[in-house]
Every structure is written in C-alpha cells, then in structure tokens.
Image (cartoon, rainbow, N blue to C red):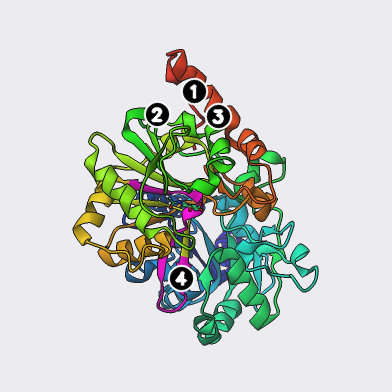
Amino acid sequence: MKLFILLIQLLHFCNAEKPNVHFFFRTAHPDVDFHQKRLTAAKESVLTQAKALSSQDRVFADELEKREDYYSHFLVVNALPYVKERLKENTAWIFIGEETTRVELEFLLPYIDNLDKSHEPVIIGRPLFDQEITIIHHFFGSSGSEYKTFGFPDYEAGFLINIPMLNALISHYSDWEKDQNFNIDPKHEFMKFVKTHLNVDLAPSKHFCGGNWHRSPKTCYTRSHKELHDCGLSEKEKIFVGVKTTEMFHKDRLKVVKRTWGPKFDNIIYYSNVSDPNIPTVRSGPNTERGHCQKLYHIMEAFLKMTGYDWLYVADDDTIVSAYRIHRLTACYNPEEPVFIGERYGYNLNSHGYPYITGGGGMLFSRAAVEKWKKLGCKCPAPDTPDDMMIGLCFHNGGVPIVHLNNFHQARPDDYSEGYLDNNTPVSFHKHWNCDPLQIYANWFGIDDMKWWATRAHDFNDQEFKHEEL
Ligand SMILES: *[C@@H]1O[C@H](CO)[C@@H](O)[C@H](O)[C@H]1NC(C)=O
C-alpha cells in the first residue's frame, strides 16, 4: 500500500514537471460564422482530448490572432508578441495550426514531451518544397538551387516552435517590420525569415500529416481534411459571374474559357472594351493595361441593377475555375452578410498595410458586400488602378470581412509545391502563360464539373453525388 501511494506521488510529481503546451490556430476570418465555428471546433477538439488524457492543466488552446490586428497577425510573426503574452508559466512548446487542423493529442503530447529540451531555437513540421522558382515566393532561390531543398512548414499540418525560437523571432521583430513587400505566401515568408535571421532549418516530422493523412499508413499526429466542407450547393440562379477581358484576348483566352468553365455557369457576362457579338461581350468602357478598377466597378454597378442573385464572382479571362466548386463553397456562407472571399494577399501587412483578394484566382462577393461597397462610396483613383488592391482597401476600411481561402490560386499549379496542392481541393488557378489551360481545367476540375453538369442536364437527384463530409 505504501509503495502504491509512493508510486502515485511519483507519477504526480512527474506529471507536474511536464511543461505546458499551448496550441494556437489561425482562422480564415474571425468575424464570419462558418470560420468562427471551425476555429472553435479546432480549439475544443484539443481541450476535449486533453481532458480525456488528464492533461487539461498543461494543454491550452487559443486563436492565434488578436481580433483588432487580425490581418497582420495572420502572417504569424506579427502575432508572436501577443502569443507570448498569453503563455502560461512553464510553457515549453507552441503549436501553430489552421482552423482546419486537427491533432491526435494521444500521440502528439508524448512526442512533444520527449523532445530535447534545447536552448537553441527549434521549429518542427511537415516541410513543403518548391519544384521551381516561382513568383509566389518572390523568385526565391533564383541565384542557385537552394529553393529545391528549402523546406517551409505546411500550415495545415501545423508546426511546433520552442520558447527559444519564440524569443529569437520576437527579438528580430523590427527586421520583420522593415521588410516592406507584398505578403503572398505567409508560410514561405515566415520560414525565409527564420532562415535569414536565425539560420535555423525546419526539422521535418513525417507524423505532421496535414491533408495527405489518407495517403499513407503512418501514424499521423496532425491532419486536415482535403475535401471541401459539405454545406450543400448554391442554386445556379443565385450566382452571377463577370469576366474581365479585352479585345486582344477574345480569340485566345476567351476561347479557352468558352471551352471549359464559362458555359458551366448559367449567368455569365464577358466585359470587354468592345462589344463582340461572336462571344458575345458587353462593352464596359475603354481598355486599361495596368489595372482594371474602372472595369470592376462597372461590373459591381451592373450586378446591383440585377435582382435575384446572391453571389458575384469576378474572374479574369485567364482564370481557370471550377463552377461546381464555386457552387459548393458559396453554400457555406450567408449572402445577406457582407463577405469577400478568395486568396488573400497583403500589401505591407507586416507593418501598416492592408489585405486584399488577389484578382487572378477570382473574387467572390456576397450581395451584401456589393451593397456595402455602394454605401461606402469607394472611388477608383484612376481607371487603371489595380482593382483587387483598391477593393481590398475599400473593404478593409469599411469593415467588410476579407476571407482567405487557400482553395483559390493566383498562380499556375506548377507554382505551388505538390505537397501543398495535395492538401486541399483547389477551386481556381490563374494564367495561361507557359502552361496548357485546357489540360489544367481537365486535370483539376473537369471531372467534378462534368459530373455535376451532366447531373443537372439530366435532372438527376443531386444527392447521388453528395461529396464526402469533412
Ligand atoms: C480595345 O482594346 C485593345 C487591346 O486589347 C486595343 O488594341 C483596342 O484599340 C481597343 N479598342 C477600343 C475600341 O478601345
């Protein structure tokens, strides 16, 4: 009996010695119901498991971003001082993941407890690699082949940093703020910062799985779902699509659109600088080379004059998109709330800039967002001002949630690492340059779109093709 009590005390002592682990989750937007729910689910999942493992005293879960500084905190480095404020004493490891990331605490916690107690900065995760030098990574590695071996963390798989890493990064905060630039891919930009200032590489773990958990039999400590969330389907009468084009591209780019995704939308208008009955196109003002602010605002005005639509999707003539998946995605949101969705970039967000939805992957507006734009009275400084940045700034100042979904893509499939693309279900890609857009559409979207289209054409029951739940 005495021995038993001693054992219990010893166990208790060991447990008390184990340091805390704090989980932080990034969200696509804290003010949008759908995402708030997913964020809450991510946190609760950790806490429920902690309780089941009797570790609720040493496992904590929070959102990464402070509400007021949401967009810059989303870049992670900006959030670190705030992360530090919230840590309990005796915290050794910080886990950062996405609202879609789920952890298997039963495996992850013992793994963390067995990690070396290093005084050196450490970062552990699932490394992604570039296949080529790419614009989305600011042409990183163009002076050598470093890009091929530079591993950056898959955020959906989540990653761990220790306290020395946290402190080292905070001590370099001013370097981060000084680096004025476009914020394109936070995970790559974060790791580049770690490498540049601390000369630390990402320590790989194959147990941080992210979206490829179903691909291999290994034990996954983390995972995220690959499929789109199943919210049902928006009705085809509820979505209006405006395509920005110009005469020069009627014969090549529009030909591709007409052969692929264009006809899959029931309500689509091609806005050009000339009206061409062969497409047909609608004239929306003179051509502009640099940006298309005037054209975008023309489309938004036109949208407001039409009744019955819940959603406006604005695409470029070289956007490649899945109509079916747009119908899927939109069903997760309330069109009566202002919401602006796509791939979110930032302009100097690391200091005092602003976020915007990058236009190439397409910009998705709820009707309420377009109405809010009208009320805000935002103007184009010039007809050729970059439209995506202008509307981003307008919505940012006007308090319209700008939602980041990594299903949208500003670049070609080749610009993204394979491991990343494998994580999720793309909705769009962009550019016809140096690639075959017909093939990209067929490879990535064709089957889904065709199946859905055929179903509709034959008036089958949609339920037959109901997609996998999360
Ligand atoms: C329309 O735009 C093209 C460039 O795509 C330009 O060459 C042409 O002159 C423009 N036409 C008119 C009528 O503005």
Residue 448's disc is 3
The nearer-to-camera label among 3 and 2 is 2
User: Which residue is denoted by mark 1 in the rendering?
Assistant: 453
Task: Give the number of the mark in front: 1 or 3.
Answer: 1
Mark 2 or 1, closer to the camera: 2
Whether 3 is among the magenta residues is no
Horizontal relation, residue 41 to residue 303: left or right: right
Residue 318 in sight here: no
Q: Of the residues shown, which amino acid type is indicated by label 3?
A: Asp
Cα separation between marks 1 and 3:
8 Å
Q: Which mark is residue 347?
A: 4
How far apart marks 4 and 1 lie (CA) works out to 38 Å
The correct choice, above or below, for 52 with respect to 143 in the image is above
Question: Where residue 158 sits in the image (x, y, percent)?
Answer: 57, 58
Q: Residues within 10 Å of mark 3 (few under 14, many from 20)?
A: some
Q: Is residue 289 visible?
A: yes
Dot 1 or dot 3, earlier in sequence: 3
Q: Which circle's residue, 3 or 4, is located before the other in the chain?
A: 4
Q: Which residues are magenta?
A: 346-365
Q: Is residue 375 left or right of 190 when viewed as pictured?
A: left
Q: Which mark is residue 266?
A: 2
Q: Are marks 3 and 2 in contact (CB under 8 Å)?
A: no
For marks 3 and 2, the one nearer the N-term is: 2
Query: Which element type, helix, strand or loop, lies under badge 4?
Result: strand
